[in-house]
Amino acid sequence: MEKIKYMNGVFLYGASGHAKVIIEIAELNDIPVLGLFDADNSKTKLLGYKINEYKTFPKNSNYCISIGNNLIRKKIAENNSLNFINLFHPNSSISRRTKIGIGTVIMAGVSINSSSIIGKHCIINTNSSIDHDCSLDDYVHISPNAALAGNVTIGEGTHVGMGASIIQGIKIGKWCTIGAGAVIIQDIPDGATVVGNPGKIIKINNQND
């Protein structure tokens, strides 16, 4: 997939550790970081970039949400009519036959293979692997070193923990939490928290909460 450059720069929404990684992705793509916004008004700078310098969002600008929490990212995206953009690390490998929704960030060492579909405002984190024909809904976070085999489906807002493995053809529901190192060999319902090898459901959250 061709990397898109946004020469007029980008503002980041969120100014903590996750934002540091996204700042460096922008820098590697020669995309100017124009500033950051954060709910914590005591923050003033991050990696030398100003935080909360602007009282309102500048118009006709690009934005990327630099917050790891999936639910917060969804609330920000839905409550602000901003021009969100994608940011892809130049050392990621993305099939040209993959479709990626707006606002998604892809980190270093990621591999996404043919005919996969990635939703809006997803995080595909460092060295994770997504094989052919996978489908990830909006606001999904795939943590570092997680691996998805072919034809895996993941619902909105689900967080796949660091080093987790999901075998081919598995369907994981919405707003699930897949624990670090878990091995998923069967379908997972909405709202489930899964840990272990093989993965076992230890809790199911009420989706109306």
Image: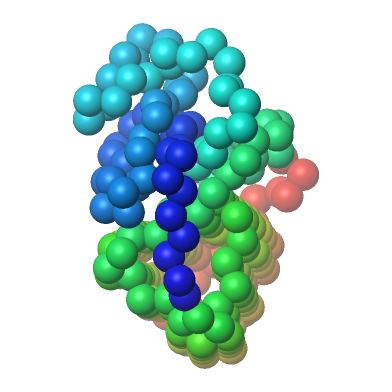
7 or 147: which is nearer to us? 7
Pick the quarter of the image with the C terminus. top right
Q: Where is residue 87 in the image (x, y as percent from the top left)?
A: 43, 54
Q: Position of residue 113 (x, y in %)?
A: 46, 84
Q: Residue at left 22%, top 25%? A: 48
20 or 4: which is nearer to us? 4
Q: Residue at left 53%, top 38%? A: 63
Q: In this view, does 15 lie to the left or right of 185?
A: left
Q: Residue at left 60%, top 55%? A: 102
Q: Is residue 89 visible?
A: yes
Q: Can residue 75 be seen in this view?
A: no
Q: Quadrant of residue 61?
A: top right
Q: Where is residue 51 in the image (x, y as percent from the top left)?
A: 37, 19
Q: Where is residue 169 in the image (x, y as percent from the top left)?
A: 58, 88
Q: Where 23 falls versus 171 (above or below)?
A: above
Name the residue at the front extreme.
Answer: 7
